[in-house]
Amino acid sequence: MKILQRCLAGSNLKTCIIVFAVLLFSELGVLADRVILKIQVGNPAPRSQSKEIKVNLPAGIGTNEIISLDGLDLGYDIKNDLYYVYKKIDLEPQQILQPFNVEFKDIWVVPEETLNGLQKHIDGMIEKLKGKEQEKTAQELKSEITKLLANIKILQEQNSIKSGVKTIQHIRAYESNLAEMETARKFIGRMENLVLATGQDPGRLEGDPKGAPTPKRDIEMKPQDYKTVIVRITMKNVSAVERKDPLSRDLPSEIKANDVLDSAGLDVRTDMKPGICCIYSPSVVLAPNETKVFDVKIRDKWNVNFPRFQYLRATASNVLERATAKSKFKSIEDMLKGLITELDVLEKDVAPVELNDKYVAFFRHQASKLDVIEQKINRVETALKPFEPKVGFNAPPPNPKTTWMIIWIILGFLAFLSLVFFFRWYGKTKAEKITDENT
């Protein structure tokens, strides 16, 4: 408040509303798991002003993380994949409003139960590898993982929500911990593979080793397989005289010119610089008080997850069947059953009906959740591959000396066959000549 007051007092701005937005920790101890986006608005002009303010929320904040909007409205930026808060503000001259406090959950923290659970997981795997030839390698991996988890706990504690710690420090510490967690999960994945190599159940797979395929988000669809959706454009003439106004409406970046199936009589063009397709008309005639509605039909490029549900459910069921046939990986079987249940629940989520920012956000976030499920399925499938029956021989390739020996043996054999063929041909020809003379 004081900062904004000083800005207004010394400001030469006369035509705009000043908006300050800053991330802060909750000031109440009981709300220590919350972060506040404090938004303050002031009018430096000597006259009243009206303006719509708009402030982006931090990346990663979605509808599930928002606790309070404090009277503001929530929107979604389709282009940048960010939520934002907005509101039309009416301000008197030199007026400073009370701050808007947008509260959301603290997403910049690795849960303590996650860290403890990973430590317990690796301790359990060490027990299963005792006395095995893989134990030494597993102990080395455990040492590295334990150090990483301890570092995460220390850095997180040092930069937790408390007096003297700035919000930006808290966020940067979390970003650093994410990199540590990624390394730890790779090591955990290697430990899990060591346990699997002994034919034992490592428990729920928590690691992320190299080798698992990335999610296949873009499942090929034929043009006729896409659903359709309507973009409704409304123009209204509130005056008492006829008007001719241009119309231009940008379509979302996913839509190209050939995705517009019915332009409702309007033109379709593409702005070559940003590559955005738009609906356009140089002049729309509107009679006094007339309203015109244009329903433009386009391919639905967002509600495209339905083939993935079928693909992932079939893949998970197939992997589950193979895991069950082994009869020794109960934890992996339970994990796969849980993933199939997650797919069922996610598919039943009710989507918005109208094409708007909420519609696009719903299906984008649904695709992200499917990515997570697919990564887990791929991880299990990769882990089970060494136990699949192999076709053919699994022998090491011959060395160069052996290779040349094989080549010379083949050449010698071919030469022998050639000689046999020549002598048989020569003997046959001579016999035929003697027969002709006797005749």
Image: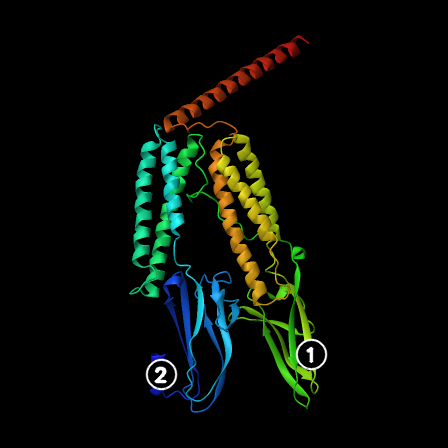
Asked if residue 263 shows in the view, the reply is no
| Residue sitting at x 38%, y 56% | 109
Q: Which residue is mark 1?
A: 292
x, y percentage for residue 401? 37, 26
Q: Residues within 10 Å of mark 1 (few under 14, many from 20)?
A: some
Asked if residue 437 shows in the view, the reply is yes
The quarter of the picture where the N terminus appears is bottom left
Q: Residues within 10 Å of mark 2 (few under 14, many from 20)?
A: some
Q: Nearer the viewer, residue 45 or 194?
A: 45
Where disc 2 sits, the SS reads helix
Marks 1,2: beta carbons within 8 A: no
Q: Is residue 63 above or below residue 378?
A: below
Q: Is residue 199 above or below residue 87?
A: above
| Residue sitting at x 39%, y 44% | 118
Distance of label 1 from label 2 (alpha carbons): 46 Å
Amino acid at dot 1: Lys
Ranked by sequence position, the earlier of labels 1 and 2 is: 2
The quadrant holding residue 167 is bottom left
The quadrant holding residue 340 is top right
x, y percentage for residue 63? 51, 63
| Residue sitting at x 49%, y 67% | 83
Q: Residue furthest top?
A: 438
The quarter of the picture where the C terminus appears is top right
Specify the label residue 5 is tagged with: 2
x, y percentage for residue 305? 59, 54
Specify the label residue 38 is tagged with: none
Mark 1 vs mark 2: in front: 2
Task: Name the side, left or right, on which 234 lies relative to 339.
Answer: right
Where disc 1 sits, the SS reads strand
Q: Residue furthest front?
A: 30
Amino acid at dot 2: Gln
